Image (cartoon, rainbow, N blue to C red):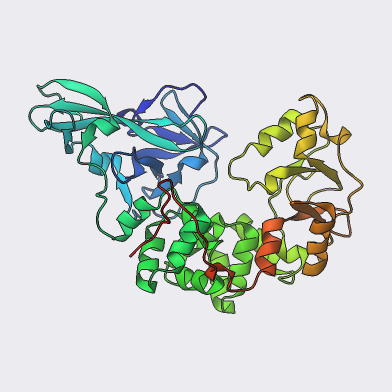
């Protein structure tokens, strides 16, 4: 949604055209996908159901939408054209929420839902349903003219939508642990039965499941991936960091590995294949291929805008790498690194090429794990560039990847005393 845009009532999105950045129409909006939450917390909007000219309906995540304005949806242009399949924790707004009978919490009066509005949370990339347009009196079609007083209320002012707090089905379990960090949710999954673990994994959206898989032991990763449909398994691998996806695929039989790589988007699969060419415990095998890369004529303001991306880990956001074109790895000639603290000290108009740290020797892709760990310890780094013999930046190794490969395999079995907001450690039965 464009900055400062007002909230949008979903009835205004029905049938709206979706365009790529070049202005070519890719399809039309047919529904919104939301995830209900425990109690009266507003549902999170996961994405749109878009119908392509071929009549196939696909899922368009909100993360791939750049704006919703003037009766049109603009996408990043990167679309997964696999057919949309609704998951257990998902609800369709047009198909399931509109025309529904709910109760006004204050009066206990039954009302009919005519419309709901969505808005973009200013400090985050998340979207939420925030208000409900309802009609008192008799039931009728969602967009049908009918007698009866109409009013708009906050989501929390009505009951009859949200999940119940009791029960331990996968749906309730996911809602209960929605606020957990991926590592903590991974710890929960690790200690569930295999059956319950598969249920929860199937209900998670692709990005969330990818984050959780990256924190699980290899045995759990392989078990969960093996129980997913192959096309969905490929989607989840695409959502994972390339180095983690490469590590996971390396554990699979050759025929399964090739089949999944073939199902992945070609660009995503190419990154993973490149990483799989290196030994696992080397800088090349540890690195991610998606660090922040800037050209020499970029400014401090450009760099800070890239660093603000909330999808980046703190380690990757700690520095940017200045290279000649092309900007994607493997890049043109690597010129040096600019550390985040330096970005904060210089004026926004300063060129990054004038403040690079070019004294620090980058890692070679064949450097072994002990050498990489020594580099981090010696220079107090949280991320380090990996450069090949030709001087091209191949990627960056982060300190968390080094730790993951240096800790004992059973480190996740350690008892962590993590407390929730009420001071009690989260648990499941």
Whether residue 211 sits left or right of residue 344 in the image: it is left
Does the rendering let one see residue 274?
Answer: no
Above or below, 224 against 376 in this view is: below
Above or below, 138 against 365 in this view is: above
Identify the image quadrant of the C terminus: bottom left
Q: Position of residue 302 (x, y in %)?
A: 72, 31
Whether residue 90 sits left or right of residue 82 in the image: it is left
Does the rendering let one see residue 258?
Answer: yes
Q: Quadrant of residue 153?
A: top left
Which residue occupies the extreme right position in the image? 359
Whether residue 102 sits left or right of residue 422 in the image: it is left
Q: Residue at 35% of width from left, 68% of height from top? A: 196
Front in this rendered view, residue 183 or 334: 183
Q: How many marks?
A: 0
Above or below, 10 against 59 in this view is: above
Q: Position of residue 240 (x, y in %)?
A: 57, 57
Q: Where is residue 314 in the image (x, y as percent from the top left)?
A: 65, 46
Q: Residue at 24% of width from left, 30% of height from top? A: 157
Q: Residue at 35% of width from left, 44% of height from top? A: 33
Q: Position of residue 183 (x, y in %)?
A: 53, 58
Q: Residue at 58% of width from left, 45% of height from top? A: 311
Above or below, 321 against 154 in this view is: below
Which residue occupies the extreme front position in the image? 423
Q: In which quarter of the image is residue 357?
A: top right
């Amino acid at each position: 949604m464009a900055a400062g845009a007002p909230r949008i009532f979903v009835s205004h999105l029905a049938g709206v055209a979706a365009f790529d950045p070049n202005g070519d129409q890719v399809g039309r909006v047919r529904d919104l996908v939301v995830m209900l939450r425990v109690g009266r917390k507003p549902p999170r909007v996961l994405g749109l159901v878009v119908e392509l000219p071929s009549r196939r309906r696909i899922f368009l995540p909100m993360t791939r939408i750049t704006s919703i304005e003037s009766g049109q949806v603009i996408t990043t242009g990167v679309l997964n054209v696999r057919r949309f399949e609704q998951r257990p924790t998902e609800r369709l707004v047009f198909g399931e929420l509109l025309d529904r009978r709910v109760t006004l919490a204050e009066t206990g009066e039954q009302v009919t839902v005519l419309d709901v509005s969505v808005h973009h949370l200013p400090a985050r990339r998340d979207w939420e349903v925030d208000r409900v347009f309802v009609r008192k009196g008799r039931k009728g079609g969602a967009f049908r003219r009918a007698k009866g007083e109409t009013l708009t209320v906050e989501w929390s002012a009505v009951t009859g939508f949200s999940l119940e707090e009791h029960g331990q089905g996968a749906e309730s379990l996911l809602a209960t642990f929605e606020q957990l960090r991926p590592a903590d949710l991974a710890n929960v999954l690790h200690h569930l039965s295999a059956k319950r673990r598969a249920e929860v994994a199937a209900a998670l959206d692709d990005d969330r499941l990818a984050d959780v898989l990256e924190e699980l032991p290899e045995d759990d990763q392989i078990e969960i991936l093996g129980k997913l449909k192959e096309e969905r398994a490929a989607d989840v691998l695409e959502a994972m960091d390339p180095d983690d996806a490469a590590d996971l695929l390396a554990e699979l039989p050759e025929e399964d590995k090739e089949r999944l790589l073939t199902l992945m988007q070609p660009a995503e699969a190419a990154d993973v294949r490149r990483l799989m060419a290196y030994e696992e415990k080397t800088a090349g095998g540890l690195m991610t291929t998606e660090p922040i890369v800037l050209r020499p004529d970029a400014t401090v303001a450009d760099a800070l805008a890239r660093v603000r991306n909330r999808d980046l880990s703190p380690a990757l956001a700690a520095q940017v790498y200045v290279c000649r074109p092309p900007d994607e790895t493997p890049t043109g000639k690597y010129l040096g690194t600019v550390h985040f603290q330096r970005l904060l000290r210089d004026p926004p108009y300063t060129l990054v090429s004038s403040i690079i740290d070019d004294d620090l020797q980058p890692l070679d892709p064949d450097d072994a794990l002990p050498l990489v760990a020594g580099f981090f310890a010696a220079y107090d780094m949280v991320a380090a560039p990996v450069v090949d013999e030709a001087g091209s930046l191949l990627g960056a190794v982060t300190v968390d990847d080094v730790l993951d490969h240096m800790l004992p395999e059973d480190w996740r079995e350690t008892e962590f005393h993590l407390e929730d907001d009420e001071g009690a450690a989260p648990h499941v039965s």
